[in-house]
Image (cartoon, rainbow, N blue to C red):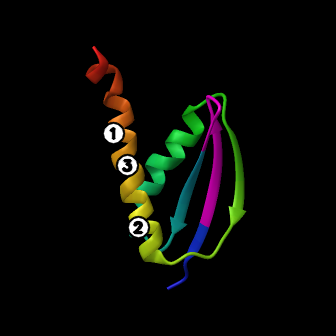
Amino acid sequence: MTLYSFIFTVIFANLELRIFIIKTSNKFKKEIEILTKFVTVCDYLKVEILYIGVTLNKCKRFLTDLFIKLKIEENIPCIMK
């Protein structure tokens, strides 16, 4: 199986985030589509794509953590009310 790994360095609202994108068969197709939408939806976004070799497990853990953090950040305004 061929594994392609990318790092997106995302600068949004003065925050620098690193998003790992992996492309392999169709295993993470849904996650990649969601991250791609996130990248294209944000207008004030600078994305630098760098190729990096990382293991599949590391990417999988990162994606899981990323989605948990995004869900928490989405709900912060509700929590603060």
| Span of residues in magenta | 6-16
Residue located at (39% from left, 34% from top): 73
Magenta span includes 24: no
Q: Quadrant of residue 77?
A: top left
Within-10-Å neighbours for mark 3: few <14, some 14–19, many 20+:
some
Q: Note whether residue 14 is visible.
A: yes
Amino acid type of the residue tagged 1 in the rendering:
Lys
Viewer-nearest residue: 37 or 81: 81
Measured Cα–Cα span from mark 2 to mark 1: 17 Å
Residue located at (27% from left, 14% from top): 81
- Asked whether, in this view, residue 40 is left or right of residue 63, the answer is right
Q: Secondary structure at mark 1?
A: helix
- Asked if the residue under mark 1 is in contact with the one under mark 3, i.e. CB atoms within 8 Å, the reply is yes
Vertical relation: 13 (above or below) 65: above
Residue placed under numbered mark 2 in the picture: 60
Residue placed under numbered mark 1 in the picture: 71
Measured Cα–Cα span from mark 3 to mark 1: 6 Å
Amino acid type of the residue tagged 2 in the rendering:
Lys
Within-10-Å neighbours for mark 1: few <14, some 14–19, many 20+:
few
Residue located at (44% from left, 61% from top): 62
Of labels 2 and 3, earlier in sequence is 2
- Asked whether, in this view, residue 59 is left or right of residue 41, the answer is left
Vertical relation: 73 (above or below) 81: below
Amino acid type of the residue tagged 3 in the rendering:
Phe
Residue placed under numbered mark 3 in the picture: 67
Q: Position of residue 80 (x, y in %)?
A: 30, 19
